[in-house]
Amino acid sequence: MSRRGWVLFALMSVLWGIPYLMIKVAVEDVSVPVLVFARTFLGAVLLLPLMIRAGDLGVVRRHWRPLLVFAALEILGPWALLSDAEHRLTSSMTGLLIAAVPIIAVLVARVTGDAERLGPVRWTGLLVGLAGVGVLAGPHLGGGNAWALGEVMLVALGYATAPIIATRQLKELPSLHLAASSLAFAAVVYTGPAVATWPEEVPGGRVLAALAGLGVVCTALAFLLFFELIREVGTSRAMVFTYVNPAVAVVAGVLFLDEPLTATIMISFALILCGSVLATARRAPAATPTPEVLVEPASEPAS
């Protein structure tokens, strides 16, 4: 990998590892709809002009149906569920649970018609990764935490399913168009709920900074850098940074929010990471190139 590729890789590892921290801060003073609206609106405002300048807007109109489904599974549902779950879960735990996305993606692809055979190594990865999720979630299955855990696992399911839709039905849609139009659609949907739950007083500077960081840095800037990383190293190598995001989420939560770093977290992280690597292992390189589509990993935008 080139020096530029390593720089982009490091930036993406951080930019999609810290949204959990910012979400945890923002939900202190604003509602979930306001948080999601702020993030999607800022991202759309910055990316839409770039999409318009790039041209070929007709491709968005031709694929509006699968585009709406993609946006619902990648942004509309997940970003709201994540924000609500972090009322009760730490940002580090949320980031670690989202790290199970590659494992769930293998299962979803298998169920939806992926003909690729799962050998012993990949089955082992699935079991190890799911064991890691169990180790992390087991002690928190009581009370409201169980609901929050369910929300995060729904987010992981959405993140695992959306890229399959993008790969199979949105191949003709450039990554920039996919990101900008999805964010714009989500912002429109959340406008009404955000207005209805708008805070009576202006939130504190800490919360405003978190909202701005989510929209500008972790969404608009992150997507642009992600596209550059794909151009520099290719889709398959670019997505390796998703294995680093959970570690960033844990470190950020410990350093800035004084969240605990327990043996359970360390063990579950090791299991989930090893499981993800094994479950997504390929026996041989594919003969055809991988479509360069937008895939929001384990970590919204945020992701």
Image (cartoon, rainbow, N blue to C red):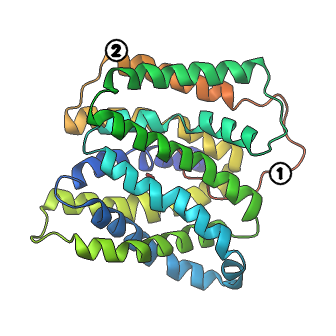
Residue at x 56% of width, y 56% of height? 226
Above/below status of 86 relative to 209 = above
The mark that comes first in sequence, 1 or 2, is: 2
Picture quadrant of residue 33: bottom left
Horizontal side of residue 280 vs 69, given as left or right:
right
Q: Position of residue 77 (x, y in %)?
A: 46, 57
Above/below status of 118 relative to 128 = below
Above/below status of 178 relative to 17 = below
Return the residue nearer the eye: 147 or 134. 147
Around disc 2, counting alpha carbons within 10 Å, would you say few (fewer than 14), some (14 to 19), or many (20 or more)?
few
Badge nearest the viewer, 1 or 2:
2
- Can residue 72 be seen in the rendering of this structure? yes
Q: Give the residue number, with chain letter if any, for mark 1.
A: 289
Horizontal side of residue 191 vs 27, given as left or right:
right
Residue at x 64% of width, y 65% of height? 175
Instruction: Please identify the quadrant where the N terminus is shown.
Output: top right
Q: Position of residue 152 (x, y in %)?
A: 42, 42
Residue type pointed to by label 2: Ala
Residue at x 12% of width, y 61% of height? 204
Horizontal side of residue 6 vs 29, given as left or right:
right
- Can residue 212 be seen in the rendering of this structure? no
Q: Give the residue number, with chain letter if any, for mark 2.
A: 263
Around disc 1, counting alpha carbons within 10 Å, would you say few (fewer than 14), some (14 to 19), or many (20 or more)?
few
Return the residue nearer the eye: 14 or 102. 102
Residue at x 48% of width, y 60% of height? 75
Q: Position of residue 225 (x, y in %)?
A: 53, 58
Q: Secondary structure at mark 2?
A: helix
Picture quadrant of residue 51: bottom right
Residue type pointed to by label 1: Pro
